[in-house]
Image: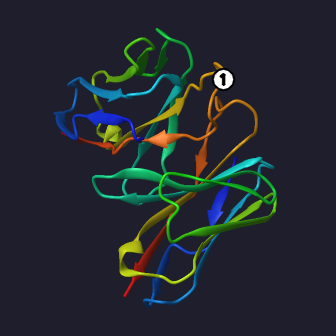
Amino acid sequence: QQPVQSPQAVILREGEDAVINCSSSKALYSVHWYRQKHGEAPVFLMILLKGGEQKGHDKISASFNEKKQQSSLYLTASQLSYSGTYFCGTVRLNAGGTSYGKLTFGQGTILTVHP
Amino acid sequence: DVKVTQSSRYLVKRTGEKVFLECVQDMDHENMFWYRQDPGLGLRLIYFSYDVKMKEKGDIPEGYSVSREKKERFSLILESASTNQTSMYLCASRRGGPPSSIQYFGAGTRLSVL
């Protein structure tokens, strides 16, 4: 089952902030965030492995709420280069506390940053 | 740098043709994946392989098969292409072990079935 991302699209001006959410109906082992620019391969941003874990990457950071099975990606003081489609990918936790191996992606959030 | 190479960027095929999409990775990764990407639906997993000759169905395997005879190469096969298989196909690879490592993607093959 695919995780659900919201919003589907965001339009920003340079310097504005944005939040992209990712939620799953299943218990999660990890959440992965990728960005894809038009005509290019998706590129890795970050992985969150533990509940409550937050990671940062320049002005892009993310959090993972294990209990709510949700993750959020925060883009601060957006730049033109942030434009693209953002995907969250989730790895489910199985009954034994380990993971299924496959990474399942959401439907994507299109982020457009204007000057 | 890790490289995942898909043999074609664009392919045009006719309904009923057998189609092979090839993917090669150069990092000795155990795991390889095939996704299709459609607007509004994101990336959907078709098949994955965690070792040579091993394969598992993803979320949308119907109408597809795969082959992994060598570690570095993972092929997606459309036995009889149909128009609803027109899409962007992305290959990815990842090292083995817990799924906490980076998954690297190829640039994609845009397939049109007429």
Q: Quadrant of residue B91?
A: bottom right
Q: Position of residue A38 (x, y in %)?
A: 36, 56
Quarter of the view holding residue B65: bottom right
Q: Give the residue number, with chain letter if any, for mark 1.
A: A98
Give how far across and how far down residue A37 sits, in percent.
39, 50
- Asked if residue B7 is positioned above or below residue A15 in the image, the reply reads below
Chain for numbered disc 1: A
Which quadrant does the C terminus of chain A fall into? Answer: top left
Q: Is residue A32 left or right of residue A75?
A: right
Crowdedness near tag 1: few (<14), some (14–19) or many (≥20) residues, C-alpha within 10 Å:
few
Q: Position of residue A13 (x, y in %)?
A: 16, 33
Disc 1 secondary structure class: loop
- All told, the count of numbered labels is 1
Is residue B107 something one can see in this rendering?
no
Q: Position of residue A78 (x, y in %)?
A: 28, 29
By what rule are the colours in the image chosen? rainbow
Q: Is residue B39 above or below residue A36?
A: below
- Determine the residue located farthest toward the top in the rendered image: A52
Q: Which residue is depicted at the point 45% across and 75% down?
A: B111
Above or below, comparing residue A30 to residue B25 in the picture: above
Amino acid on which disc 1 is placed:
Thr
Question: Is residue B35 left or right of B82 when viewed as pictured?
Answer: right
Which residue does the image show at 23% across and 23% down from the upper left? A17
Q: Left or right? Give the position of B26 relative to A95.
A: right
